[in-house]
Image: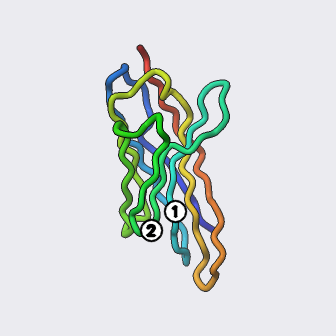
Amino acid sequence: QVHVEESGGGSVQAGGSLRLSCAASGSMFSINVMGWYRVAPGKQRELVASITAAGRTNFADSVKDRFTISRDNAKNTVYLEMRSLKPEDTALYYCGIDVSNVGSATYYRVWGRGCRVTVSS
């Protein structure tokens, strides 16, 4: 069984920075896409950023040029560096990791429990 846990959330003022981390643990699995999602008050979940095993990244238009995503494959960890934060970035941020069991070609997504980011004006 794969377990995913986020860390690094908190409260900052507008213009500030935060770094989120998400680590996957367990046994006998491989990882494909690692992504960060968020749920803002009154809104649906949206993809913030994702990164493939090959390092290809994808960002929501609202965070391009402000957020950076990276991964450390040796540590099964993905990071989200957030800069120039805005009040509209306030949300519960979730990590979603696509994993497959060794010997299987089927990937399934494992979610973390989320970490809260609050940006005050």
- Say how many tags the image has: 2
Position of 49 relative to 118 (above/below): below
Q: Residues within 10 Å of mark 1 (few under 14, many from 20)?
A: some
Query: Which disc number belongs to residue 33?
Result: 1
Residue placed most toward the observer, 70 or 114: 70
Q: What residue lies at 67% left-to-right and 35% top-to-bottom?
A: 44
Asked whether the beta carbons under mark 2 and mark 1 sit within 8 Å of each other, the answer is yes
Q: Position of residue 53 (x, y in %)?
A: 44, 68
Residue under label 2, please give it: 53
Quadrant of residue 45 in the image? Answer: top right
> In the figure, is residue 89 to the left or right of 66?
right
Amino acid type assigned to the residue bearing label 1 in the image: Val
How many other residues sit within 10 Å of disc 2, few (<14), some (14-19) or many (≥20)? some
Q: Which mark is residue 65?
A: none
Question: Spatial distance from mark 2 to mark 1, Cα to Cα?
Answer: 6 Å
Q: Position of residue 67 (x, y in %)?
A: 37, 40
| Residue 23 image offset from top left, x and y in percent | 46, 57
Considering the numbered disc 2 on the image, is that residue within a helix, a strand or a loop?
loop
- Residue at (40%, 40%) from the top-left corner? 64
Q: Secondary structure at mark 1?
A: strand
Three-letter code for the amino acid on which mark 2 is drawn: Ala
Q: Residue at x 57, y 54 (%)?
A: 96
Of 27 and 46, nearer the camera is: 46
